[in-house]
Image: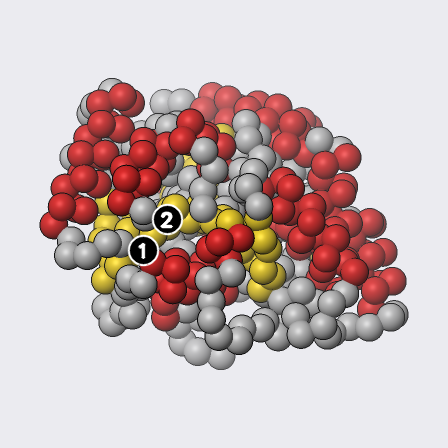
Amino acid sequence: MPDWLTLYYEDPVELTHGEGRHVWDAEGRCYLDFYGGVLTTMTAHALPEVTAAVREQAGRILHTSTLYLNRPMVELAERIATLSGIPDARVFFTSSGTEANDTALLLATAYRRSNQILAMRNSYHGRSFSSVSVTGNSAWSPTSLSPFQTLYLHGGVRTRGPFAELSDAAFTDACVADLEDVLGQAHGGAAALIAEPVQGVGGFTAPPDGLYAAFREVLDRHGILWISDEVQTGWGRTGDHFWGWQAHAASGPPDMLTFAKGIGNGMAVGGVVARAEVMNCLDAHSVSTFGGSPVTMAAALANLTHLLEHDLQGNARRVGGLLIQRLRAVTAGLPVVREVRGRGLMIGVELAGSDGRPAPHAAGLALEHARAEGLLVGRGGREGNVLRIAPPLTLTVAEAEEGAELLGAVLRRTQDAVEAERQP
């Protein structure tokens, strides 16, 4: 394996099995999972309906590719097209969020005949050459080479940057003015804006509701497409909405949305939803070898059905709201905690030093302490100073309370360690 492969923990953990919101390692240690494999085990570990669907489909046929039809793929496409909110929608399946964003960028540049892309600062859209080149986070962008001319906009981070002290309305106005200024300086017409409604790897940061609706009014005047990257925000995780773009719906749905991660509940599923006019613009052959696999489609169908029938979006809203409140309560008065933010079961805890600057070292300590306490959380932010909390959407009230208490103890221990390190 490469040296640059990211592994959590000084002594990396081997996870062997899971059930519900818990996982076990090779030494038999049980952990409460507040990260779900980077928001991918969206519903629950070993969800019986998904396990049964995989087993049944695997007994028939494992693989066909998008060159052939299979019933689970068609049924899932129909359901996602309806749920997307995009009129006359078409769906193309891939095997990851990175590939989904690649496809959306391909469609946008082909449709608009432009290689200019608008993207947000602090963003993340995948690890391929094209998706890295529209990622506005240097920690995840290993090369300056790019197939695009990428123009980065303000707005993805509400509490930092030159507009942080403004009111929400003034913040939105300033970001729209920045967009207008960028477009005025760019030669030719940009193909698309790609944006995460809530920035995932960036540390679960978000603009005020309605920002992208205001952007959309400007984009429409120029014919520029809007791609909503829903790889982490989709399927009800934010609680208030099924899709992240719906917090910015005043100007209508996006032209395209991309999805992945949670819909497969651990299986490799991704895809793009787009208006038919945009989706059908390619004039060359294009297939996905592993997109639309019968097994992954069967798993995703079973998972989506479970999610809708059990109102997991509502559970994310109720239990996530409780969890945010509890985390704010247990971290109150801790100088190392700059902010607890988020919505639904998509929560960030930002750590900072006594000078207010990002504290990645403290986040590293907290990650290790959490593991020692039997709690798995993620880590993100441009400086690596944000703890990312995204449990499966079936999280119970009791588990939310338990996790909040554990994290409170972890952060108090982290605070003590940071203070001890400052002693002469």
Q: Earlier in the sequence, mark 2 or mark 1?
A: 1
Does residue 410 appear left or right of residue 176 in this picture? Answer: right
Q: How far from the left and from the top, in percent, is residue 149?
A: 23, 62
Of the pair 104 and 384, the residue shown nearer to us: 104
Place of residue 331 in the rendered image (x, y in percent of width and height, measured from the top left) = 43, 27
Q: Secondary structure at mark 1?
A: loop
Q: Is 35 placed above or below 331 here?
A: below
| Residue at 69 percent of width and 49 percent of height | 78
Q: Which residue is mark 1?
A: 191
Q: Do the residues under discs 2 and 1 have CB atoms within 8 angstroms?
A: yes
Kind of element beneath mark 2: strand
Which residue, as the protein is rendered here, is positioned at the far left? 185
Residue pictured at 71% horizontal, 39% vertical: 307
- Res. 366 in view: no
Q: Is residue 289 above or below residue 77?
A: below
- Badge 2 density bin: few <14, some 14–19, many ≥20, Cα 10 Å: many
Q: Which residue is mark 2?
A: 225
- For disc 1, the neighbor class at 10 Å (few under 14, some 14 to 19, many from 20) is many
